[in-house]
Image: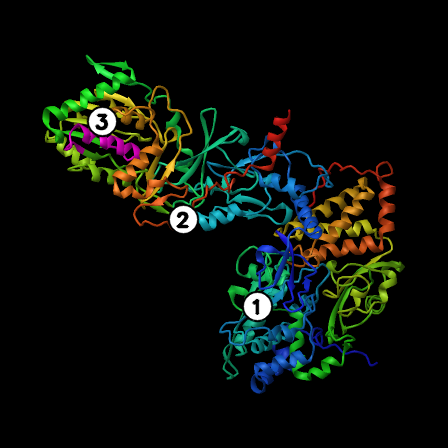
Amino acid sequence: MAEFEPVLLANIHKPDSHTLSVYRAAGGYAAIKKVLSTMSPVDTVELVKASNLRGRGGAGFPCGLKWSFLPKDAPTVYMCVNADESEPATFNNRILMELDPHQVLEGIMIGCYATRAQTAYIYVRCEYPTAYKRLHQAIQECYGAGLLGKNINGSGFNLDIYLHRGAAAYICGEETGLIESLEGKRAWPRIKPPFPAIEGAFRKPTVVNNIETLANVPHIVNRGADWFKSMGVPSTNPKDPGSYGPKLYCISGHVNTPCCVELPLGVTCRELIERHGGGVWKGRKGKMAIPGGMSMGLLTEKEFDTPLDFAGPGKVGCLGLGTAAVTVMDETVSIVDYLNNACRFFAHESCGQCTPCREGTSWTSRLMTRILSGKGRLKDLEILQSISQSIGIMPGTTICGLADGAAWPLKNALGKFRGELEEYIKKTNPGGYQQEEPAMALVELAHH
Amino acid sequence: MCLVETGTKNKETGEISMVPKLVPACQTPAKDGTVVVTNSPKVKANQNFVQEGILLDHPVDCPICDQAGECWLQDYYFEFGHQERRADIHPFTSKRRELGPHVSLFADRCVMCSRCVRFTREVSGEGELMVIDRGSHAEIDVFPGFPIENKMSGNVNDICPVGALCSTDFLYEQRVWFLEAQNSVCTKCSTGCATQMHVNHNQLYRIQPRFNPNANDWWMCDAGRYENQFVTAPERLDGVMIRRNNAWEPLDWPHAIREVYNHVADVALNHGGSHLAVVLSPFLSCEEAYLLASYAVSILSDVTLVVGKIPVVGQDEKFKAGFTIRAEKCPNRRGVEEIVKHFGKQPLDWDGMLAKIATGEIKGAYVTGGYGDPWIDDAEAAKFERLESLVVQDILPSPLARRAKLVLPGVTAFEKDGSYVNHAGLIQSASWGLRPHGGAHVDGQTFSDLLGRRGIYNAADVLKELAVKVPFFARCAEGVPPAGLNLVTGQEKHPLTTELGTVTHPTPTFRSEASRMLEVESSTR
């Protein structure tokens, strides 16, 4: 197979890659011109549908299908662009926004044209000041060049793009949480249905797409759906829409060269580590890896050959591909430390709307803190197991998927590393690991 | 969230296919053929887990919590929760901080239902309360420097299902299972909120609104709830006093009744009926007003009947959800007016009477009061000095009482049975909960004695009599249901015949699981 040539990241190494002139020189804004002059919105949706482009934000919902859910006769449709990239170790959107913002904007324009949206909001997390600045500049440039505003290119298509900065909450990356936050409320996700496509931002039909998803759209328009489907892993089962196209993989953790690379979907975790990440650092061996952001669970070293496509991680007990942000941990990392970190993160980020998540995540965090401090009991593992099984959308006890994300690291760690956890507890608490009575809480180690 | 299992029944095969996951019941529309299971082991296990989660951060300080005994968390935990604690045991904390003059917050006890936040946004409309922080750190709070001090703030204490928001006024005053509830009607303004007074050992501990969709919904204002100190005021009139030789002398009731006749009837008989004014206070119940009016016209049919002074303060205050505090600060203007209109030859209002006193047309007066707040000033009272005879029946001393020849102690609405007609014509009945103060008599008893009736005054019987005699009250012939009867439109918005409870006790028969267990325990001991 010939060496894969990056598409999404083709421009980022050029000097001043974030400017309109550089983007145009590389053939930018040809796709929107083509769409405006030759295609109808329905054609555009059909094209994206035919390409089987799946959402890159985590859930992998087919993008074209999402666009086709919008009511046909709705007078006002909003496009919300989810740039609240808060999944730990994920930075692919950031690279796109900082180094090639025009590619993103072109994707947004085509998306808006396809969905008949005349207003788009880009919800940027506040920790990305450069991305905000570059996007802001890029939008200004587009207005100056007549690519945004009224009657773009004489096509009668109007579009305004607004930038909205979040206030650093993980939950704002959940699509309805994002909409609530955009409306100026607490980012408490909404109960679905109604889905945003029916009633979203400001009670109007809304389509919420990830930055990377939209960045793929101009290339699909330029090169066609067949080109897009020539990459990736074809569908093996009629219910699975397949994993096609290029994907940005973020590699971080204990590797020699942490980076973001663009590869066709379906590359294995081991290949990412060895070939693109430069191998595990300090000559050590890998112990485990997170396949796609903290909430997706855990791969053991033996499972490193799992192909990272939309269906791959699920086959080895992980939640899914997620954001394809691979975090590698070497053999010195304790599973207790990993789990403590994961639990603390989700306890901190739980929005507090649903009791099972609010209390469940903080409970796991406290249990892990106590285990870590050498006061763990074997019974705690059973409690962790029971919490992990009763929070989340999967058992149906919460509104959004944050709790599933909190449950999966627990499920995987308890399933794949139970021996190590038990050993740690027995070693650190030899006198009390078999205790069954409720323990006294640690006062000074309140989580935050 | 109330999680349930749902499924759909296939109409043709009758087969039920269940959805594998749970759904929140309140957010799931029911359709034809929807199957809902609320008590399967799976549902129970999850309810159980939610209960356990809520109790993680809860201090379980029930022994010192005011809400204990009427706490929904207690009840639900008894019903759905774990019997054993799996979570770590936390140090005991119950820090109180005041969010406003009437509202105390124990943040640890909060279960984050955010009903109070919704109340301030949707009902009172002032929006002082908010949720701060996130996840398990979330707390109810006010913005610094902006306490919750709207005129309906006390309601947030009622709607708090646990002991997180407590009434500062009631704090640590009484365990709720010792309290006895009596249905009452608020007399603070002409909205006439249906209330419950909670009493133990003849002491009024708190007042809570009683649900009445025709008058006040679930709410009442802070004035009605907290400003009832006059009931136990030390200066309350507690015995009949007569002025003899420029000095006050006490008098017993049988003599007092005769003295009233001497003072009042003499004026009428000497000068003619129209020279005697009998003032029916808007604080009298309909029954009492009827008896007093009957007594007045029994002396001479042309005795002047006067509607007492109507206290008006400021403007009506309407809140977001429609609840209104009225400027007219009396409970029964409407009812008294109807009775005066029915019996009086030339009914007068207060100012009309003052004018006639000034011209000397009125030579004697029998004035009833019952006002909780100071209602007459020295200058106005001085106008009564020209009268030959003045009898005052009131609950508190006033400049007018000081000028009277005979002072009869009356009682407050908490101490008497009676019915009141609110601004919209809704008649509601109240029961007594406290015994009359000191040597005071229930006003109805006094009027009944004046009329020469035998026995104890019974408001229910008088109301039936009133319904026959005065057409306006005809609908009350069968008594008044808890949600009241609208005498003006002849139809209630919500005709409810069942007994109605408060927010904390939605049905009056509801007793909390905890207090029921206490009862069982004490009865078996």
Is residue B147 shown above or below A296? Answer: above
Mark 2 or 1, which is nearer the eye?
2
Residue A34 visible in rendering:
yes
Which numbered tag is attached to residue A136?
Answer: 1
Is residue A24 shown above or below B497? Answer: below
Q: Name the one closer to the observer, A43 or B224.
A: B224
Is residue B111 shown above or below B10? Answer: above
Q: Residue at x 78, y 55 (%)?
A: A411
Q: Quadrant of residue B5?
A: bottom right
Q: Residue at x 31, y 31 (%)?
A: B371
Residue A258, position in %: x, y? Answer: 78, 64
Q: Name the one closer to the observer, A322 or B458.
A: B458
Q: Tell me the crowding category of disc 3: few under 14, some 14 to 19, or many 20 or more residues within 10 angstroms, Cα based.
A: few
Identify which amino acid the numbered label 2 is placed on: Pro
Q: Residue at x 64, y 63 (%)?
A: B8
Q: Please, what secondary structure does the residue beneath circle 3 have?
A: helix
Segment tinted magenta in the rendering: B280-304
Q: Which residue is mark 3?
A: B378
Q: Is residue B300 magenta?
A: yes
